Image: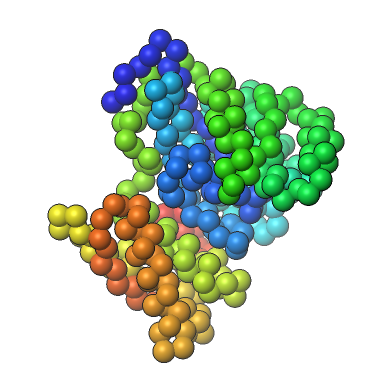
């Protein structure tokens, strides 16, 4: 455990925003490891993911939340929104993430959810895409009129632009506390959970928009022999047509998903991985709240 200095700070930082503003990419960049999945398909984060970074001066406990859903009121989205609200009330600081030059009704709805009692920083992500950098100032001023933000920091999570400045601002607003996690911890999630998330990321990245959100991944078996991990996973889809889509012609798509998943796992776990993936058709549990809980969507 890290020795606590007199001014050592530690706290929970919730990362919130509408879907696809780059919350998961931002958290991964801040902690320097991939613990939350990313995809162009909005709403790939279904769970509350904790990422941890420890420095000599502070322990940052980032909580990546699902993007708040404003359109469809089904069981999955209700559970996702409940996760966001619960995270906000339990955090020491909120990072409210928007995309540079983009602020619409969905962004405003998320902003209105953030309790006024919790310090909130505005993070303007993807600022490298703004060709006219002078346009960022009036955009920031427009948003500053919406709330009294603790700080406003334009960043680019992908390019790591201004992340050091953002982290220093975050540290200033954390309470003085001893560290909660070990100095080498990067997440509170198990390797089994992370393996499932990696496969799910590749699934949505490589199959595309045609695959429903209800498609998910289960780890049937996770074994470790020395440095080698043997992982057996199942991709669960709704229909036979989706199964054929995931497998691809002569199994090419499934092979690609498996290869890319294995490479990411080996990087994250720091050792060789033997991975087998099957594709199975599941029965209709997705709109049943008991079924959602059974699959971990609390």
Q: Quadrant where the N terminus lies?
A: top left
What residue appears at the point 39 percent right and 77 percent down from the top-left corner?
255
What residue appears at the point 44 percent right and 50 percent down from the top-left corner?
34
In terms of depth relative to the viewer, which is nearer, 223 or 161?
161
Residue extending furthest top?
6
In the image, taking residue 195 as reference, residue 229 lies left or right, namely left
Residue extending furthest left?
226
Q: Is residue 190 visible?
A: yes
**Residue 263 higher or lower than 278, as above or below:** above
What residue appears at the point 61 percent right and 40 percent down from the top-left corner?
161
In terms of depth relative to the viewer, which is nearer, 137 or 92?
137
Question: Where in the figure is residue 284, as x and y percent of width and height?
Answer: 48, 72
In terms of depth relative to the viewer, which is nearer, 232 or 69?
232
In the image, taking residue 273 as reference, residue 81 lies left or right, namely right
In the image, taking residue 232 as reference, residue 207 lies left or right, namely right
Question: Where in the figure is residue 4, as x and y percent of width and height?
Answer: 35, 17
Question: Where in the figure is residue 239, as x and y percent of width and height?
Answer: 49, 80
- Rendering colour mode: rainbow
Say how many tags the image has.
Answer: 0
**Residue 47 higher or lower than 223, as above or below:** above
**Residue 275 higher or lower than 22, as above or below:** below
What residue appears at the point 51 percent right and 44 percent down from the top-left corner?
29
Question: Where in the figure is residue 186, as x and y percent of width and height?
Answer: 38, 40
Q: Is residue 293 visible?
A: no
């Amino acid at each position: 455990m890290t020795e606590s200095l007199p001014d050592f700070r530690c706290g929970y930082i919730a990362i919130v925003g509408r879907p696809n503003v780059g919350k998961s990419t931002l958290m991964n960049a801040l902690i320097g490891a991939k613990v939350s999945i990313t995809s162009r398909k909005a709403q790939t984060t279904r769970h509350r993911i904790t990422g941890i970074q420890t420095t000599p001066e502070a322990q940052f406990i980032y909580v990546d939340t699902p993007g708040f859903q404003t359109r469809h009121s089904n069981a999955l989205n209700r559970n996702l929104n409940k996760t966001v609200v619960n995270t906000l009330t339990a955090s020491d600081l909120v990072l409210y993430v928007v995309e540079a030059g983009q602020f619409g009704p969905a962004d405003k709805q998320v902003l209105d959810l953030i309790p006024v009692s919790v310090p909130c920083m505005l993070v303007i992500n993807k600022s490298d895409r703004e060709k006219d950098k002078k346009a960022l100032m009036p955009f920031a001023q427009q948003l500053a009129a919406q709330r009294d933000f603790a700080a406003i920091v334009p960043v680019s999570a992908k390019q790591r632009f201004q992340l050091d400045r953002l982290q220093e601002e975050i540290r200033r607003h954390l309470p003085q506390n001893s560290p909660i996690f070990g100095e080498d911890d990067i997440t509170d999630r198990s390797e089994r959970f992370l393996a499932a998330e990696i496969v799910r990321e590749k699934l949505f990245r490589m199959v595309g928009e045609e695959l429903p959100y209800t498609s998910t991944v289960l780890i049937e078996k996770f074994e470790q022999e020395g440095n080698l991990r043997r992982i057996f996973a199942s991709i669960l889809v709704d229909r036979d047509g989706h199964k054929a889509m995931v497998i691809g012609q002569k199994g090419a798509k499934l092979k690609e998903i498996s290869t890319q998943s294995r490479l990411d796992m080996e990087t994250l776990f720091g050792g060789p991985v033997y991975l087998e993936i099957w594709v199975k058709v599941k029965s209709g549990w997705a709109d049943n709240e008991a079924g959602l809980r059974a699959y971990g969507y609390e």
